[in-house]
Amino acid sequence: MQYIEHILYWAGDNIVLSLVLGYLAACIESFIPALPIMAIAAINAAINGLVGGFLVSWLGSCTGTIIVFLLVKKLAHKEFFLKRRTQKVENIINKIERSQFMVIFLFYTIPVLPSSLMTIAAGFCNIKLKDFVVPLMFGKFLMMFLASYIGSDLVGFIQSPLKILVVTIIVVGSYLLANKMKRDMDKIYEKRYKEKK
């Protein structure tokens, strides 16, 4: 992590380079879960500002997660991935099958939950990419925004109840909007399915 931090600060003088490296750092974290994504997002925001740091962290992390999901989907029968189908992964698979949207959303929103295991478990499940991407993007949106918001002005965040309130409103609003989008998408796909019949 120290190396990534040094590289991002070194690239800070060149805005394009710092955005590209920030994006790649967030993307790579999906393949190396040991890297702390919250710290990467906070550093990105400290270097590139709230908006720039947030966007590269969010898009990079979503891109990496979708790539891992598709790889697991494609290669789930291979020995490398079968070895990763541990009891923890099986437990998450059961949770996804019971409450798909809610579980995926929460795993990508709350930093302490093992989102890397969620990605692997979702890849093993019978879940379509469209059903995975919506809660993923909204969950990551909240997590990355929170980390970027805090990282861009840590002292100001701690001292301002208004900023804490803004984060809370965004969390609740994003969840409600994501749920609505999911229902709308389901209606569109149902309509297309009926038209094909």
Image (cartoon, rainbow, N blue to C red):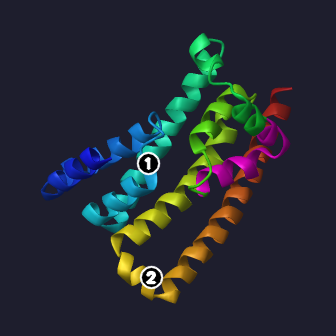
The numbered disc on residue 158 is 2
Dot 1 amino acid type: Leu
The numbered disc on residue 5 is none
Q: Nearer the viewer, residue 13 or 90?
A: 90
Q: In the image, 97: left or right of 169?
A: right
Quarter of the image holding residue 24?
top left
Q: Mark 1, residues whose alpha carbon is within 10 Å: few (<14), some, or many (≥20)?
A: some
What is the chief secondary structure element of the magenta stretch? Answer: helix
Judge whether residue 104 can be spotted in this image.
yes
- Asked whether the residues under the numbered discs 1 and 2 touch, taking CB atoms below 8 Å apart as contact, a structural biologist would say no
Q: In the image, 185: left or right of 15?
A: right
Q: Residue at x 55, y 61 (%)?
A: 142
**69 w.r.t. 153: above or below:** above
The C terminus lies in quadrant: top right
- Label 2 SS: helix
Q: Is residue 95 magenta?
A: yes
Q: Which residue is mark 1?
A: 59
Q: Which numbered disc flags the more N-terminal residue, 1 or 2?
A: 1
Q: Nearer the viewer, residue 195 or 125?
A: 125
Residue 159 at x, y = what percent?
43, 87
Residue 134 at x, y = what percent?
63, 47
Q: Residue at x 52, y 38 (%)?
A: 65
**87 w.r.t. 23: above or below:** above
Q: Residue at x 60, y 45 (%)?
A: 114
Judge whether residue 128 can be spotted in this image.
no
- Label 1 SS: helix
**41 w.r.t. 73: above or below:** below
The region drawn magenta spans 94-109
